Amino acid sequence: MNIENIEAFIYVIHYGSFNKAAEVLFLSQPSVTARIQSLERELDCRMFDRIGKQISLTDDGKKFLPYAQELLQTFQKSKIQLKQKRTLPNELRVGCTVSVSNYVIPTIIPKMKYKYPDVNYKLSTAVSEDIVNKVLNRELDLGFVRNISHPNLLSAKAYEDPIRLYVYKDHPFIGNKTVSIDDIGEYPLVFFECGSLDWMRIHRLFASMSRPPNIEFQTDNLETAKKLVLQGVGIAFLPSLCVAQEVKENKLFPIEFPQTAGISLQTNMIALNGENAIFFNSALDLCKGIAQTIRDHI
């Protein structure tokens, strides 16, 4: 069956005229008429009743219409898919910080692969500044970084991860509504340091305490900090996303202080201006689910 004949049939119905359909299809009116006649011969039935300049669908035409619409839509979708496949790269190179690599990428990449099955994914981990430079040098296609901006980069907030104090099971802070920020000084502290401006706010918080914190462990690795708290050797300020599962399982517990409200880590997605927009927008949409996960656990 000739798809052009079906297209002519749909356009004649839509515009109610052979002449108008011919104009929109950039064809002559006799060409449209010939396509309809070819379709009628193929289906061995008449599609239209013609009374003067007026046309109307026959009963057979009405029966065929939904099938014709479905056939044309399927054909048009296939053209879009094939065109998209030709324009998509074989490989998408994604750079991310360690925390994104641990807690975000395992959720996002399988969904990206499902959406773009013919694309392979190369993932690398680095600090934000290195990722920015590699995106600028076209060594990476997408990057997940801290809140960094650059005039040559498309940048958008992927999600915001609140920093809170987390304690282990049976810690005295749990359920105690009279806990103050100064009480932190009475317990060993595991301090995770990532060097961002948000962590500087935690440092300033320590400066305002009447008793300095007892920092017995310092690490630049989130998983190490979390596992030390799980072992009960100390308490720690941690981003909510990295402990979502442990909070759900009642292994770690958040402690609220007014002084820590609004302290969070912002992660942005970046790409070179004018490039990889389709992947940028898809990944950004998927990050909405990550943001919802964070909201569910705070």
Image: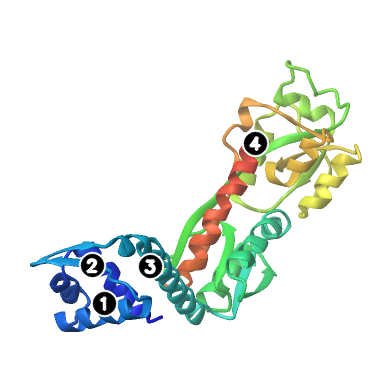
Identify the disc placed on residue 117.
Answer: none
Residues at marks 2 and 1 touching, judged by CB atoms closer than 8 Å:
yes
Q: Nearer the viewer, mark 2 or mark 1?
A: 2
Residue ID at (71%, 59%): 106
Residue positioned most to the front: 44
Q: Earlier in the sequence, mark 2 or mark 1?
A: 1
Front residue (pair 34, 100): 34
Label 3: which secondary element: helix
Identify the disc placed on residue 48.
Answer: 2
Residue positioned most to the top: 178
Label 1: which secondary element: helix
Label 4: which secondary element: helix
Residues at marks 4 and 3 touching, judged by CB atoms closer than 8 Å:
no
Front residue (pair 136, 113): 113
Identify the disc placed on residue 68.
Answer: 3
Q: Earlier in the sequence, mark 2 or mark 4?
A: 2
Report the residue marked by disc 1: 36
Q: Nearer the viewer, mark 1 or mark 3?
A: 1
Label 4 and label 3: CA atoms lie apart by 46 Å
Q: Earlier in the sequence, mark 1 or mark 4?
A: 1
Instruction: Check disc 2 and give the amino acid type.
Output: Phe
Instruction: Check disc 4 and give the amino acid type.
Output: Asp
Q: Nearer the viewer, mark 2 or mark 4?
A: 2
Label 2 and label 1: CA atoms lie apart by 9 Å
